[in-house]
Amino acid sequence: MSAHFGSRLRKGAVNTTVAALAVAALAASQAPDVTADTPGGRTAADAPSGDSATGGSEGSATGNSPYYTDLPPLNSPVPSPTQSTGTTPTGAGGSETGIPATVLDAYKKAADALKASKPGCNMPWQLLAAIGKVESGQAGGGRVSADGTTLSPILGPVLNGVGFANISDTDHGAYDNDAVYDRAVGPMQFIPSTWAWAGRDGNADGKKDPNNIYDAALAAGHYLCRYDWDMATTSGLRKAILSYNNSTEYYNTVLSWLEYYRKGTHEIPDGTGALPGNRSDGGAGRGTSPSPWSPSPTRPSTTTPPATTPPATTKPGGGTTTPPSTPPRKPTPPAPSTPTDTVDHLEAAGATELTATAGAAFGEKISARAETKAGKGVGKVRIRFTVTGGDATFAGGESVATVQTDSAGVAVAPALRAGEKTGTFTVRATVMGRTVPALQYTATVTARAADALARTGSTALTCVAGGEFADQVEVKATYKGAAAGKVAATATLVAAAGGTTANDKGPYFKDAAGNRVRSLTDLRTDADGLLKLPKLYADDNAGTYLLSVTTTGGATLTVELTVTAPVPTTPDPSEGTPDPSQGTSDPSGGTSTSPSGGTSKTPSGSTSASPSGSASTGS
């Protein structure tokens, strides 16, 4: 997108042919699910939930601001090195097609972050680079500070309805230094109203700055992925790009650079990138000046200057003549009125109270109607829906959604999904660019629940006293026949059927320290509704015991556990045979004869004779 492109033919048939070839090459490498265009350059299927498919500026990140139309060179790019060399490669594009080091780093870090937070989006860093090239010529040739902030503001044209969209100020000039109209801001050209909810802190400095390439690149990635579109498919890629700037020519230009960068690119030092030269609205590119597209406007005066009458002059020979007075100048017409200016209030167009189980989608979508004072619906007005006080999100994981009203004045918010936080929160609907009372919708999130529990196995649970159970207890929770995932549960070895008091004997679990416990809380089923309890052990008490498992929602299951007494051991027969060398005893207290033939004294004091015939007399 360099001003030096003047030496090459970049318009007409060549421009169209290159774009067509790039689109065809990219489409051939992806799923063949592209759909036909509608007159607005966008398909009906392309319109995300809540967006307008008619080409309104409110449905885009940039307000459909102008963009740079320069196309990549026809020769192959230089592969991107893993380390910055600090030098600009020669040939194959040079600074014209290279990506400044800090800007390239921002794209790659944003894509890496999205792999973790939104893996299904399959965001390639080359797509962010392609959009950055088309929107700002890679932050004006990489003129950024070490932390990624542009050295001078990059502002799009004034969106005052003259040749562009008409978007009244929404940020009081905070981002675009314009308190009258909005302008696209920064290297990725976000309009302030979009940045208000899409902005991200990409360089972890605690700020969300649209003029910082790290923040803007991460925000652009989240914006493109907000409706769970898959960048690995043609339809997902198309929908995402058209949502950024609703123009088929824009889509083709971005694809041309995407395909070029996918073949490889090279890193160049910051500040050495080529500056863009051709703009989609026919205006001049940024040339060699780092100044914004155009200066901030001032509101035109509507005061009519007074008519002026020149002084009278003296006629020759006497008398005076008065020249005709200068007619007053016509007043400068005020800025054209917009539909937003006619909105008097908002009315709820559907339910104002919603309920959902944690993690589930709310059954109804929130909708609001913009009306005049007379109650007539106002179309083409931007309504912002904001989640307050809860962790619910709209489609794509965002807590804010901006939607344009249809011809009846109704804006329908994207589907709202409950988070894990239970309780009540609110969703506020406000009119963008106009101060009218907000609408509030009440939403309640209830805990995940199960209405049935069942064991997954049928083996009898038995154990010998003092041992451990061979099988662990596993149960499955369901709700209305479907698996009940992430449901809270408790398990207690109860003293009696139907009771909740833990037993003081019988089977037990062990805690982390190895201590006996007979009640477990803070359990939770997995995504498939399964819950496997820890191993059970038995103390020395034989008998039949009960394990009670309960869940949120009232599902209860009682499991029977049997502990058997130890089997008696059989005595060793060798232990009951007397030793012959020890003699025999007389139970009556008489004498006993020893094998040696002697006699021994009996307990009663009588004598015993030995086989040798000698005798001993008791005392």
Image (cartoon, helix red, strand yellow):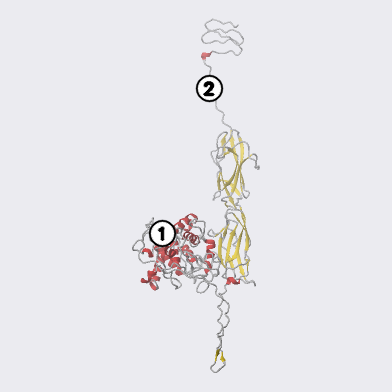
Q: Residues within 10 Å of mark 2 (few under 14, many from 20)?
A: few
Q: Amino acid at mark 2?
A: Pro
The Cα–Cα distance between marks 1 and 2, rounded to whole angstroms, is: 91 Å
Q: Which residue is under mark 1?
A: 101
- Percent coordinates x, y for residue 69 in the rendering: 43, 69
* Residue occupying the far bottom of the picture: 317
Element class at badge 1: helix
Q: Earlier in the sequence, mark 1 or mark 2?
A: 1
Q: Which mark is on residue 573?
A: 2
- Percent coordinates x, y for residue 426 in the rendering: 61, 59
Check the picture and name the quadrant holding the C terminus: top right
Q: Is residue 95 visible?
A: yes
Residue under the point 55% across and 13% down: 584
Q: Is residue 124 visible?
A: no
Residue under the point 57% across and 28% down: 568
Q: Amino acid at mark 1?
A: Ala
